Image (cartoon, grey):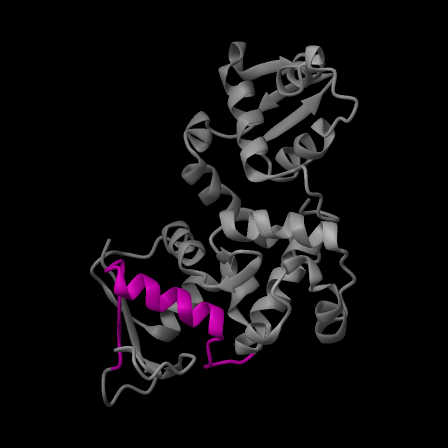
Amino acid sequence: MFGQRMVTPAIPERVYVLCRIVRSSNNHYISDKDLRERMEPSFLGNNSSYYHDYLTAATELRLVQVVDGMVSLVVEPSTVDSMTSLRKHCNGIIREFSGGQFFETTKAYFNLGINVLTGPNNVAEWGGRFKDEAGLTINNMELRAWRFWFTYLGFGYLHDMFLLPSAGTFIKDVIDIAGMEKKRRYSFGEFIDLIRPYAEIVLGEEGGTLNFGLSNGLRSLHDSGVITLEHIYDQEDIWSLYPMQLHSMSATVTNITLNK
């Protein structure tokens, strides 16, 4: 799902359930055979098995490991307390999949900026656009798989079958992972340096200018009180948001404070 090509069955909810089953087992160990039976009971008579797909995703995300036919949890049990805690873990290691299909597709989408609004209304029809704009070869099933994790990890929202980029939830997780101090005013350049190791997937390619999807996410965090964005006059470290004239932070920002 992340190391190579994206597959539709490996949705976040199935990965989460798999991890919860492993966690609830004796000493957080369960045989591969028993885990598969728990995930796909034989009495249902389903001739199609997708178990390997979501086990592979859980392994890629360093949530579980498989040794000698036994599946064990390799994270702190609290990591799978909730879908939220699982998401934060995933966002902390997504950078390790640079070069993988999910990472490169998401990065290309954010690099398109405002032009994403002129793409097909159905995410499954974006294959041609990604081929033309970023040289990525992605089929419609892989794009359907991409949308599940794109929305879950907090890169944006799905409206009908159209993805709207707004990386607020992802950036909030990254802020926590990076150890940003609350109530401290950072220059915006300091902030970018703090999150860059975890956030290259959305930062784009233009220094000093933030793309459409990242700008949307930061404004949403500002509006909800999670952060405060400021443009303080006489500051030299000036960054440009994607212009939005009706917003209080319409164009540029020099400082950021984490409130909660």
Spot the residue most to the bottom: 234
**Image height of 50 relative to 166, above or below:** above
Which residue lies at the image location 56% right of the left edge and 69% below the top edge? Answer: 110
Give how far across and how far down residue 243 sits, in percent: 40, 83
Range shown magenta = 206-231
Give how far across and how far down residue 35 sits, in percent: 64, 17
Which residue lies at the image location 56% right of the left edge and 61% below the top edge? Answer: 162
Which residue lies at the image location 46% right of the left edge and 28% below the top edge? Answer: 76
Q: Residue 62 falls in which quadrant of the image?
A: top right
Which part of the image, by quadrant, shows the N terminus? top right
Which is more toward the observer, 32 or 77? 32
Give how far across and how far down residue 165 sits, in percent: 50, 64
Which is more toward the observer, 96 or 24? 24
Is residue 208 covered in magenta? Answer: yes
Which residue lies at the image location 63% right of the left edge and 60% below the top edge? Answer: 122
Give how far across and how far down residue 142 sits, in percent: 72, 51
Is residue 249 covered in magenta? Answer: no
Spot the residue most to the left: 183
**Image height of 134 relative to 86, above or below:** below
